Amino acid sequence: MSFQIPRGTQDILPGEAEKWQYIEQMARDICRRYNYQEIRTPIFEHTELFLRSVGDTTDIVQKEMYTFEDRGGRSITLRPEGTAAVVRSFVENKMYGTPNQPVKLYYMGPMFRYERPQAGRFRQFVQFGVEALGSSDPAIDAEVIALAMELYHSLGLKKLKLVMNSLGDAPSRKAHRQALIDHFKGRISEFCEDCQSRLEKNPMRILDCKKDRDHELMETAPSILDYLNDESRLYFEKVQLYLTKLGIAFEVDPRLVRGLDYYNHTAFEIMSEAEGFGAITTLCGGGRYNGLVQEIGGPETPGIGFALSIERLLAALAAEGITLPVAQGIDCFIVALGEKAKDESVILVNKLRQSGMKVERDYQDRKVKAQLKAADRLESAYVAILGDDELEKQVIAIKNMATGEQTEVSLHSFVQYMKTAVESK
């Protein structure tokens, strides 16, 4: 019987995994500079958490969650996104009471959604995201967006578009909600079942429908920007002002609503405009969620964050022809000839590794020529050759594979010689 990987998942093999590690390290370094600290939450949570936070009118909750009942009869869901779990932890661990506010967090890990697999979209995918909880200053909205843009720019992406909207505060959304109901209700029968069910529950979600996005009523739908009260309008203008001062270009799109119910005020997406990237251009999405902490049982606490897919980031890099500077090759390959030399090579390899070098030796009892070919395939910077004769003389031959230069050093000074040679490359 043969086994195959489940549909919508992928194996990340050696050679590809190094790209992931590079991106992850870049994200961690940028978060360190912005003073965001890592948080790690469980891969599964109680289903009610996502019902209350993500919203029961969203596609995620209605169609995409991996939900099961455990042996205790509890409904458990594999996390479909990261914000709800972070906010749950923020409330449960009373992080709102810590002296350093706002609480600035980042996460990285697998998420799960049952949706049709396609290029750059998987049923198990990895998200990197940040959450800033405890500040209603529009400057932190700009900071969160700047952090996302810096990650993309640091990796070399240039063909990006930042799109923004304001979803307003509660009074603004209430006025806009009624305007949307009035706009759509006369012809709602022309829309899909999802849109029909959302008309009264959450009409703004109609604007996010993929099936009916070309319907003529979509183009003439009331804009949230026309219903912003003074407070919401000034807030959005301030966010735009800060982005302009930071030199971050953006477009305002009043139809941008995002796919999660917990957003209000600032909402944004970063898209790839690279030729041939594909129909789904969104790389990153986020926004402000001032009522989410209360919804999950905490005190009134404003928050803002974003999440991005590592898979789609890699696809964007490929679309722009960007090769990450991932280190290839090893520092040294030790070729051993003779039983005593082989025994000694085990010790030498360990000493070099303990000194911080990337080192390999033969484990298949191959001839010298085959060992040298193995060193070449591994792109070894140096080859050290040790035979029984050299062992008796307490020396070892070292060849620089780039220049062809060969030298002989004592076994006593071999580790220090190699360390100096590798560091000076």
Image: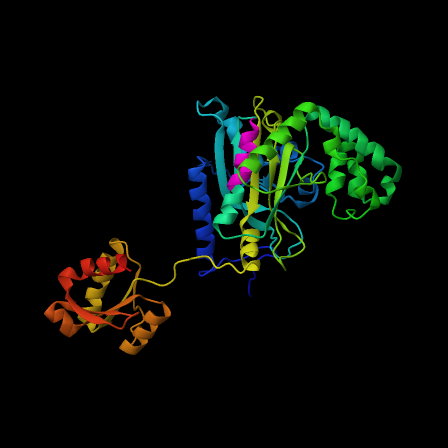
Q: Does 19 appear above or below 108?
A: below
Query: What residue is drawn where x is 55% and y is 39%?
Result: 145
- Taking 41 as reference, is 401 left or right? left
Question: What stretch of residues is rendered in magenta?
Answer: 137-147
- Taking 73 as reference, is 382 left or right? left
Name the spot of residue 108 as percent of width and height, x first: 50, 43
Query: What residue is drawn where x is 75% and y is 29%?
Result: 227
What colouring method underlies this structural image?
rainbow
For the C terminus, the quadrant is bottom left
Query: What residue is drawn where x is 32% and y is 66%?
Result: 380
Name the spot of residue 20 as percent of width and height, x first: 47, 53
Q: Main secondary structure of the magenta part?
A: helix
Name the spot of residue 106 as percent of width and height, x first: 49, 38
What is the quadrant of residue 379 in the picture? bottom left
- Taking 55 as reference, is 367 left or right? left
Can you name the residue that lies furthest to the left here? 393
Would you say residue 74 is visible in this rendering? no
What is the quadrant of residue 217 in the picture? top right
State the residue in front, 151 or 116. 151
Query: What residue is drawn where x is 69% and y is 44%?
Result: 63
State the residue in front, 365 or 361. 361
State the residue in front, 105 or 141. 141
Q: Does 151 appear above or below 94?
A: below
Asked if the stretch drawn in magenta spans residue 146, the answer is yes
Q: Does 365 appear above or below 218?
A: below
State the residue in front, 52 or 107. 107
